[in-house]
């Protein structure tokens, strides 16, 4: 354990995104504890996003290490025109995509198959079995949060990337379109398909009563 | 429905959809399930950082600092 990280972790409890600018200034000034604080805040999220892109924890760890090195080398040039998080994710995604190509990961193409919810007359073909009401229970809600994370690898790559950036990380539609390299319209389509697919997978779980 | 949940529909489309939800149990259940799904995504916590992983990254920082 690094000597300075324990107090940093305690300080993180009250950390806000507004403080990113101050951390960047301290990192530029060569303050190691600023680096530790940034790693504590962003490394778990970066690793999750990298793993979603490259499909392997070991490769994802290499990708995040490359990313931090690029951050250290590039922090002088960071102008704060995007949020720090968006900047970090931009560097990370470029490296994760290169790594995925290098590993010749086939990936899951966006198959554009949307479940057949409606028949030709526009009526429900297979109406949804009701389960949303059961999620009021707090324990079940926590289980669902863990479960959706396990189900994410089932989605096509582009849907998963958009879903993680929008609904998990909470980035804006405009930022996500830029990061993923699609138009705003495509970003919405991918988001919609990803959500619909994930709901379908959750519904299958809930039907078994095991979610 | 995704656009509805993100509040990206024109007021008239929004109203029409809400009228439909009020009359259609299947659609309102589907909407509620989508909401639950999105909410679960928002609460998905990443794996926490191990001490070893932190140590490795601090070592990377120190190598970088000593090289520059």
Image: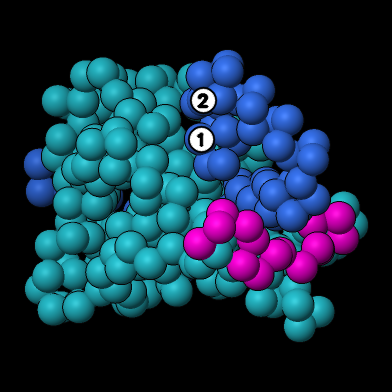
User: Residue B3, labelled with which disc?
Assistant: 1
Report which quarter residue A85 is drawn in.
Answer: top left
Indicate the colouring scheme. Answer: by chain
- Mark positioned earlier in the residue sequence (1 or 2): 1
| Coordinates of residue B15 in the picture (x, y in percent) | 66, 23
Quick check: can you spot residue A98?
yes
Total count of labels: 2
Q: Colour of chain A?
A: cyan
Q: Which residue is mark 2?
A: B9
Query: In terms of secondary structure, where does tag 2 sit?
Result: loop
Instruction: Tell which of A128 and A162 is nearer to you.
Output: A128
| Coordinates of residue A181 in the picture (x, y in percent) | 19, 43
Left or right: B30 as drawn, with respect to A189: right
Report which quarter residue A165 is drawn in.
Answer: top left
| Coordinates of residue B38 in the picture (x, y in percent) | 61, 48
Q: Is residue A122 above or below residue A153?
A: above
Q: Is residue A73 above or below residue B10?
A: below
Q: Colour of chain B?
A: blue
Looking at the image, which residue is at 81% across and 63% down? Answer: A131
Looking at the image, which residue is at 44% across and 55% down? Answer: A193
Quick check: can you spot residue B51?
no
Circles 1 and 2 in contact, beta carbons < 8 Å: yes
| Coordinates of residue A48 in the picture (x, y in percent) | 43, 60
Q: Which residues are magenta?
A: A120-134
Left or right: B41 as drawn, with respect to A177: right
């Amino acid at each position: 354990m690094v000597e300075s990280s324990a107090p940093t972790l305690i300080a993180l409890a009250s950390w806000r995104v507004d403080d990113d600018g101050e951390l960047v200034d301290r990192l530029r000034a060569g303050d190691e504890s600023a680096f530790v604080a940034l790693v504590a805040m962003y490394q778990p999220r970066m690793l999750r996003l990298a793993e979603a892109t490259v499909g392997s924890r070991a490769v994802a760890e290499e990708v995040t290490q490359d990313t931090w090195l690029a951050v250290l080398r590039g922090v002088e040039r960071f102008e704060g025109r995007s949020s720090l998080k968006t900047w970090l994710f931009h560097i990370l995604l470029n490296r994760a995509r290169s790594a995925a190509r290098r590993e010749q990961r086939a990936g899951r193409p966006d198959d554009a198959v949307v479940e057949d919810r409606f028949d030709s007359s526009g009526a429900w073909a297979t109406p949804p079995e009701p389960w949303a009401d059961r999620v009021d229970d707090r324990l079940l809600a926590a289980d669902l949060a863990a479960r959706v994370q396990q189900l994410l690898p089932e989605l096509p790559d582009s849907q998963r990337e958009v879903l993680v950036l929008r609904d998990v990380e909470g980035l804006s539609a405009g930022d996500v379109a830029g990061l993923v390299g699609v138009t705003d319209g495509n970003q919405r389509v991918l988001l919609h398909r990803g959500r619909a697919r994930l709901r379908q997978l959750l519904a299958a779980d809930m039907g078994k009563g095991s979610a | 429905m995704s656009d509805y949940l993100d509040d990206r529909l024109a007021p008239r489309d929004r109203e029409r959809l809400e009228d439909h939800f009020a009359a259609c149990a299947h659609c309102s259940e589907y909407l509620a399930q989508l909401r639950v799904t999105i909410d679960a995504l928002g609460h998905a916590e990443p794996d926490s950082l191990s001490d070893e992983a932190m140590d490795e990254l601090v070592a990377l920082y120190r190598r970088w600092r000593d090289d520059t």
